[in-house]
Amino acid sequence: MTLTQTVKTGGYRYTSGAAYVGGWNAEGHRNGPGHLVFPDGTRYDGGFENGVYEGLGILWFPDGAKYEGEFMQGWFHGSGTFWRADGTKFEGEFRGGRIWGLGLVTFNDGSHGFPRNEGYFQDCKMVKKQKCPGVVQRVQKVALMARMKVNEE
């Protein structure tokens, strides 16, 4: 992947009602750190590359759900934490916008279920029980880094 250079910073309101403030590359695409808000209340704060979410960021949804972590080509991809609106969260690995890899589910009461919902997930379903404290620790670090990056922008 070749990173493009941010050449200017500014804001733009789209005809859809979405609004963006942040960096732009020479081709006129969102690039570098930025803030994008959609008319339905969905909000993204974090990195952009050639117009799409890239690197660390946080995506808030109108129903109260939230994702903190890594993005690639606009998708949840890599390490991240996803909270559902009911408070249930998944800390683990994502591929192409889906829960895919090692991770841990924590329910809104703080439990992990019985038996414990920890292991290897494919397409949002646990397929193999496996302890993965190293992955959860890395995910927590990445989510913290995403929050810190958003707060400094």
Image (tube, helix red, strand yellow):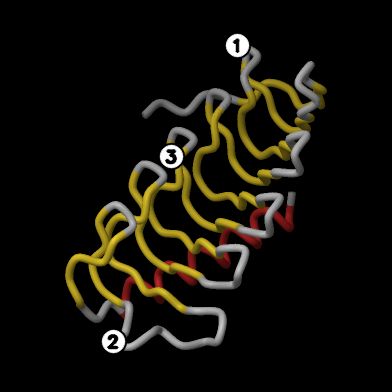
Q: Kindly check if marks 1 and 2 are in contact, taking CB atoms under 8 A apart as contact.
A: no
Callout 1 amino acid: Glu
Residue closest to the far top: 27
1 and 3 marks in contact (CB < 8 Å): no
For image coordinates 43% across by 39% down, the residue present is 72
Whichever of callouts 2 and 3 sits on the residue coming sooner in the sequence is 3
Image spot of residue 52 (x, y percent): 54, 30
Residue at the (74%, 33%) spot, across then down:
22
Residue corresponding to mark 1: 27
Place of residue 151 in the rendered image (x, y in percent of width and height, measured from the top left): 73, 58
Query: Relative to the observer, which residue lies in front, 53 or 39?
Result: 39
Which amino acid lies under the numbered mark 3 shown in the image of this protein?
Met
Vertical arrangement, residue 53 with respect to residue 29, above or below: below
Quadrant of the rendering where the N terminus is positioned? top left
Mark with earlier residue (1, 3): 1
Task: Answer left or right for 55 relative to 7.
Answer: left
Regarding mark 3 in the picture, which secondary structure is present there? strand
Question: Badge 1, how many Cα within 10 Å: few under 14, some, many 20+?
Answer: few
Instruction: Using the image as rendered, state which of residue 20 and residue 148 is in the foreground.
Output: 20
**Residue closest to the eye, 56 or 98:** 98
Quadrant of res 63: bottom right
Local secondary structure at mark 2: loop
- Measure the C-alpha gap from mark 1 to mark 2: 51 Å
Residue 72 marker = 3
- Give the label, 2 or 3, closer to the camera: 2
Is 49 located above or below residue 28 in the figure? below
Residue 115 numbered mark, or none: 2
Label 1 – label 3 distance at C-alpha? 20 Å
Q: What residue type is labelled 2?
A: Pro
| Quarter occupied by residue 124 | bottom left
Q: Residues under labels 2 and 3: Cα distance?
A: 32 Å
